[in-house]
Image: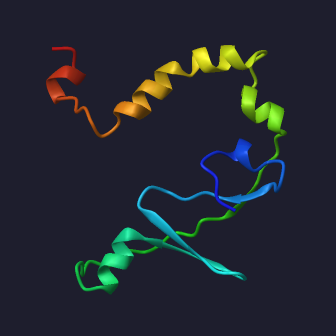
Amino acid sequence: MFAGDASAIIEHTQDVVYLRDGELVEVRRSEYKIRTTTKVAREVGQITSPRLDEENPIVRLEMSLEQIEKAGYEHFMLKEIMDQPNAVRNALRGRLYQSADDACGN
């Protein structure tokens, strides 16, 4: 089962494995394998630098669907309002770059 968010699967399972940026998953009936795009490229001979793959542990979700959806706020709408800065930041990630001068306030 695949999901972009824990709230989509919490009713079906509490054990999840999160993928990190640059990872792919190969799923079979009885197993799954997580590989990095770098490792796949290395296997086809495009990259030769070694990289140690980290394990993606199985994580047990300790929240209910209602807790996940509201993230501790009294109302879902309040959660959405408070999350707007993160939503904008995530939408712009990789599209805008901050120069060193801008970071220093110049």
User: In the displayed structure, would residue 105 be above or below residue 34?
Assistant: above
- Viewer-nearest residue: 42 or 8: 8
At horizontal 61% and vertical 57% (from top left) the residue drawn is 18
At x 30% / y 81%, what residue is drawn? Answer: 42
- State which quadrant residue 55 falls in: bottom right
Q: Quadrant of residue 80?
A: top right
Q: Which residue does the image show at 49% across and 27% down from the upper left?
A: 86
Q: Quadrant of residue 88?
A: top left
Along the viewing direction, whichever of 40 and 101 lies nearer the viewer = 40
| Render colour scheme | rainbow
For the C terminus, the image quarter is top left
* Residue visible at 17% across and 29% down in the picture: 100
> Is 93 placed left or right of 101 in the picture?
right
In this rendering, position of residue 56 left or right of residue 77: left
Looking at the figure, which quarter contains the N terminus?
Answer: bottom right
Q: Up-down: is 19 above or below 77?
A: below
Using the image, determine if residue 105 lies above or below residue 91: above
Percent x, y for residue 30? 72, 83
Task: Give the image location of residue 49, x and y in percent.
Answer: 26, 77
Q: How many marks?
A: 0
Provide residue 52's location: percent of width, then percent of height: 43, 75
> In the image shown, does 100 or 25 lie closer to the viewer?
25
